[in-house]
Image: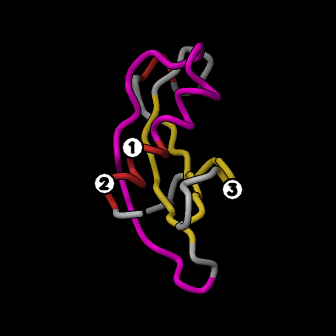
Amino acid sequence: MDVKKAVEAAKAHVMNVLGAELSDVPTTQEVWFDSKKREWCITLGILRGTSPVAGLRLPEYKTVRLKETDGSLVSIRSREYSRV
């Protein structure tokens, strides 16, 4: 699976799981390949009305992990905001 297909698959998985809650299309933030686990890791920014930051229109970040072989979903996890 190449990087473009991995990003498309990650967005499709997030839309499938959280679609009813989203107020916009997920945006790609980071992409990397975990060579030890043979998984694509894609961080997406999402906006949804139930978010604690919804009034500020700040995105939440979700990291989606996909198997390299077939793009199947391994996990969708919340990515914490980094403190500056």
**Residue at the spot x=64%, y=50% of the render?**
73
**Residue at the spot x=46%, y=32% of the render?**
46
The residue where tag 1 is placed is: 8
Question: How would you rate the neighbour count of disc 2 (Cα within 10 Å): few for under 14, some for 14-19, many for 20 or more?
Answer: few
Question: How would you rate the neighbour count of disc 3 (Cα within 10 Å): few for under 14, some for 14-19, many for 20 or more?
Answer: few
State the extent of the magenta-drawn residues as a range.
Answer: 11-36
The residue where tag 2 is placed is: 4
Q: Amino acid at mark 2?
A: Lys
Q: Is residue 78 or residue 15 the one in the foreground? A: 15
Q: Quadrant of residue 36?
A: bottom right
Which part of the image, by quadrant, shows the C terminus? bottom left
Which residue, as the protein is rendered here, is positioned at the far bottom?
A: 36
Q: Amino acid at mark 1?
A: Glu
Contact between labelled residues 1 and 2, with CB atoms less than 8 Å apart? yes
Which secondary structure, mark 2?
helix
Q: Is residue 42 left or right of residue 63?
A: left
Q: Is residue 65 left or right of residue 9?
A: right
Q: CA distance from mark 2 to mark 1?
A: 6 Å
Spot occupied by residue 10 in the image (x, y as percentages of width and height): 49, 45
The residue where tag 3 is placed is: 74
Spot occupied by residue 62 in the image (x, y as percentages of width and height): 55, 46
Spot occupied by residue 42 in the image (x, y as percentages of width and height): 46, 56
**Residue at the spot x=42%, y=31% of the render?**
58
Q: Earlier in the sequence, mark 2 or mark 3?
A: 2
Q: Is residue 82 or residue 64 the one in the foreground? A: 64
What label sits on residue 77 in the rendered view? none
Q: Amino acid at mark 3?
A: Val
Q: CA distance from mark 3 to mark 1?
A: 15 Å
Which secondary structure, mark 3?
strand
